[in-house]
Image (tube, rainbow, N blue to C red):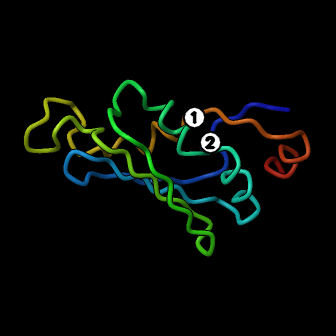
Amino acid sequence: MATIQLRQLAHARSGDKGSHANIGLIAKQPDFYAILLREVTAERVAKHFDEICNGEVSRYELPKLNAFNFFLRDALDGGGTVTLRIDAQGKTYSAALLRMMIEVSDQELAVINS
């Protein structure tokens, strides 16, 4: 087993929905989707953002796009017009998610590095 950053397997984009954050996660290659499905759960994303997300995290799977949508409730401290956070619209949340560490098998790592 190896530990890698999620950014090796995916692209991401994020933004705000009021006081909530929305993160789209897209596999760089179709073969990576199964790894993301297994490793990037709503529970793991909630733990990754536990210092700033005060609500529930939901994961929506988009298998035909090899992608996911994560919805982080109460993650923006009121949203863009009232929060005192530096990132009022959650634009950096995608980069933060891509820093999450995940585990892959040696066989998966060989495919990733090829």
* Label 2 to label 1: alpha-carbon separation: 6 Å
Dot 1: what SS? loop
Q: Are marks 2 and 1 in contact (CB under 8 Å)?
A: yes
Looking at the picture, tell me which residue is in the foreground, 2 or 69: 69
Q: Position of residue 42 (x, y in %)?
A: 53, 45
Q: Position of residue 32 (x, y in %)?
A: 72, 57
102 in relation to 68, above or below: above
Q: Quadrant of residue 101?
A: top right
Total marks placed:
2
Looking at the picture, tell me which residue is in the foreground, 57 or 1: 57
Give the residue displayed 53% in from the left and 59% down from the top.
68
16 in relation to 78, above or below: below
Q: Position of residue 92 (x, y in %)?
A: 36, 41
Dot 2: what SS? helix
Give the residue displayed 75% in from the left and 36% down from the top.
103
Looking at the picture, tell me which residue is in the foreground, 11 or 55: 55
Give the residue displayed 24% in from the left and 38% down from the top.
76
Q: Amino acid at mark 2?
A: Leu
4 in relation to 17, above or below: above
Q: Residue furthest front?
A: 56
Q: Which residue is label 1 attached to?
A: 100
Is residue 59 toward the left or the right of residue 91 in the image? right
Is residue 16 toward the left or the right of residue 23 in the image? left
* Quadrant into which the N terminus falls: top right
Q: Amino acid at mark 1?
A: Met
Q: Position of residue 58 (x, y in %)?
A: 45, 51
Q: Which residue is label 2 attached to?
A: 6
